[in-house]
Amino acid sequence: MASWISMNEACRLLGVRPQTIYAYVSRGKLEVMPDPADTRRSLYRAEDVAGLAKRKQAGRKHETLAANTLFGAEPSIPTALSAFFRGRLYYRGQDAVSLAGSADLEEVTRLMWSAEQPVDFSSSTPMRAGKPGRVAAFTALASLAAAGHSTRGRLTRVLHNEGQGLVGQLANAFGAQPGGQPLHLRFAQGWKLSAHVADLLRTAMVLLVDHELTSSAFAARIAASTGASLPACLLAGLSTLSGPLHGDASGQVQALFSEVERLGEEQVVSHYLSTGLPFAGFGHHLYPDGDPRAAALLALFEPPKAIARFIRKVTQQTGLQPNIDVALAALVTHHRLPADAAFGLFATARSVGLLAHCLEQLSVTQVIRPRGRYVGVMPSLPQGMRT
């Protein structure tokens, strides 16, 4: 039978602060339950704590700890935005997949931002500059960042209003029809899609809002910690998101799907297996049993037959389940969305999460400034300074 201990006891046994305990919980390393005697407090599974303590006994060299340290403590940032529990993603304690069943992006944004008023992404200022797509989005966002005001000392509701405008204008730049309707309907109108496909866009965007402390969220938080403007913070996050190892991973999957449509799934799978090439979009280290976001989205439509056979064959041959990048690329392929639609949907939805991280970071006055550990050529000291 499991035994449970208090926060203070867990901190004492592990030699860490409460923030680190929260990080262990969010990563599924430590099970937690409400204290029956006081529901305002939590209890932690003693066996999990003992296992963590055992792994920590070997310790880490001082230089390794220094290389991974933020704020002089464990390399983690306390957050109440999203976390992983038992292979599921939660937004402020609510299951993301369950929310995606009916909520729209505006409703989830209100949750993530803890906004007092309903969220409205309509914007009277067009952000589009030329052909819709990431060039228009990044160009316009960079202009706003250059002229933006610092976030320091400003009212939260004012920042919420500015954030709403940024998300709405970003959607416009990716091709959404300007107006006052929910964003998934505006994208459907701009891309001339049916109401059924619009609902798929709604589901996809809700599933993509946040994913705990990703590299893009960290970049946005760093910018926010310096007092940079909201558009500057968002630009920092989206620039990081645009990498093929992060938010643009679905582009690699779309390229893989193009091979399948051109050569057939048998030849593509055989080539990748024989050469040891990785299958883009399959497997996720946070979801060893499969990405529930991908499963939820793929359950709502049938990908093209060759793509569906390819997904099944890769899973059978490798044991790896498709992640959200495969589901998003399959959605784009099946409904013949614009070429950059996957990134446009991802960037628009994740801008909500990035701004949530920025708003949360503003409660901390300290600038995020990790230390470097110099490993280069030692300088030649002047004669008088030599020992």
Image (tube, rainbow, N blue to C red):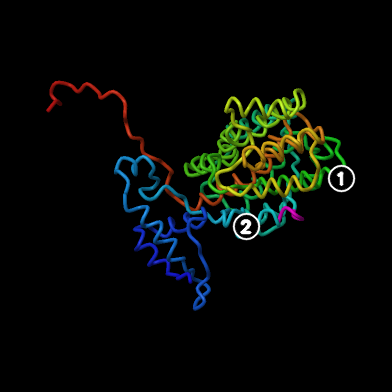
What range is drawn magenta here? 99-103
Considering only vertical position in the picture, is 349 above or below 340? Answer: below
Dot 2 falls on a residue whose secondary structure is: loop
Dot 1 falls on a residue whose secondary structure is: helix
Which circle marks residue 4 in the picture? none
Residue 255 lies, in percent from the top left, at 69, 27
Residue 206 lies, in percent from the top left, at 70, 49
Q: Nearer the viewer, residue 58 or 365?
A: 58
Considering only vertical position in the picture, is 318 above or below 49? Answer: above
Q: Quadrant of residue 115?
A: bottom right
Q: Which residue sits at x=71%, y=34%?
A: 127
Query: Which residue is denoted by mark 1 in the rendering?
Result: 195
Asked if the magenta segment contains residue 58, the reply would be: no
- Amino acid type, callout 2: Ser
Identify the main secondary structure in magenta: loop
Quick check: 385 left or right of 176? left
Quick check: 74 left or right of 102? left
Residue 65 lies, in percent from the top left, at 34, 44
Dot 2, how many residues are within 10 Å of its Cα: few (below 14), some (14-19), or many (20+)? Answer: few
Q: Nearer the viewer, residue 296 or 352?
A: 296
Dot 1, how many residues are within 10 Å of its Cα: few (below 14), some (14-19), or many (20+)? Answer: few
Which is closer to the viewer, label 1 or label 2? 1
Quick check: 341 left or right of 378? right
Q: Nearer the viewer, residue 237 or 200?
A: 200
Most extreme residue toward the bottom is: 37
Q: CA distance from mark 1 to mark 2?
A: 29 Å
- Amino acid type, callout 1: Ala
Q: Which residue sits at x=66%, y=50%?
A: 292
Q: Quadrant of residue 285?
A: top right
Query: Which residue is denoted by mark 2 in the rendering?
Result: 114
